[in-house]
Amino acid sequence: MFVSGLRYAVLVCAVSIFGGVAYGDTLTFSSGLLQDAGFSLDLGSRDLIIYSTGAERQQMLDRVTALLKQGYDGGKWQGAGLSSSAAANDPTHQTGLAVMLNDDGFGHPIYNFFDNKPVDINSILVKYTLMGDVDLNGKIDGSDYFRLDKGFLAKSKGYANGDVDFSGTIDGSDYFVIDKAFLSRSPEMGDSTAVVAASAIPLPNIAYSCLAMLGTLASVRLVRRMRAAR
């Protein structure tokens, strides 16, 4: 069940959570937990949807980005916050967690469904994907370079604008990260079934050690060469 306008986040898990509320293989928890100073979660290779509201979505996006920066940990993906053991153990070091607000800037959602789950313009999407996949479509292509170029020229901020190393600025380091992923010719990343809809009622604090178990279940010339080859 998808309830537009309510704020919640849900992940599928296959572990027993003490202090939370589990329904079969679905764990439901209030997205308010993301505001907890000690929040830590290993997503592994799973995705996350956070349903927010128009009034709170920017604050929530900033919070999720801060948690991802912690988890990114200089590229090791083993920090606190939102981390990924799958990315940490990726021998190619080309994968990680990406985030975007599902808003195209013109009053419409970018995606109507994410991992086959309905989402709206206030949804915040987190995807396990190739580093530099700023539009969360599972691959590195011209659209990602276009967003990065645009973000660089406008001095924008945020992963969806090209800050793929979570440094707070868009610079040559971000081009290096996306170039590396593009040149690696890594396979496209498919959907994860990690997110389902649920009620937004507040829940007791979840044992963060149990939550961590969920994870187990700059070259502008290259851009020009890509465009010239099209």
Image: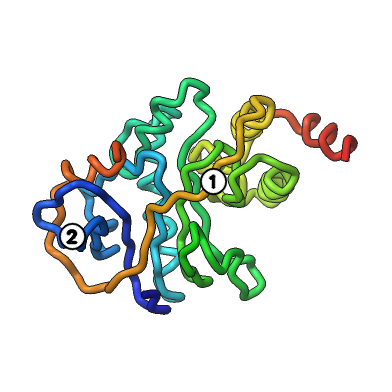
Residue 172 visible in rendering: no
Taking the image as shown, residue 50 lies to the left or right of residue 200, namely right
Seen at 61% across and 34% down, the residue is: 187
Above or below, 221 against 195 in this view is above
Rendered location of residue 12, percent (x, y): 31, 54
Seen at 32% across and 34% down, the residue is: 79
**Relative depth, front residue between 140 and 157:** 140
Report how far apart the C-alphas of labels 2 and 1 lie in the structure.
Answer: 26 Å
Which quadrant is the C terminus positioned in?
Answer: top right
Which quadrant is the N terminus positioned in?
Answer: bottom left
**Relative depth, front residue between 133 and 46:** 46
Rendered location of residue 87, percent (x, y): 43, 32
- Of labels 2 and 1, earlier in sequence is 2
Q: Residue furthest front?
A: 24
Q: Quadrant of residue 10?
A: bottom left
Taking the image as shown, residue 29 lies to the left or right of residue 52, namely left
Q: Residue furthest top?
A: 91
Taking the image as shown, residue 206 lies to the left or right of residue 124, namely left
**Relative depth, front residue between 52 and 214:** 214
Above or below, 218 against 67 in this view is above
Q: Which residue is mark 2?
A: 22
Q: Secondary structure at mark 2?
A: strand
What is the three-letter code of the residue carrying label 1? Gly
Q: Which residue is mark 1?
A: 190
What is the three-letter code of the residue carrying label 2? Ala
Marks 2,1: beta carbons within 8 A: no
**Relative depth, front residue between 91 and 1:** 1
Rendered location of residue 77, percent (x, y): 39, 32
Q: Residues within 10 Å of mark 2 (few under 14, many from 20)?
A: some
Q: Secondary structure at mark 1?
A: loop
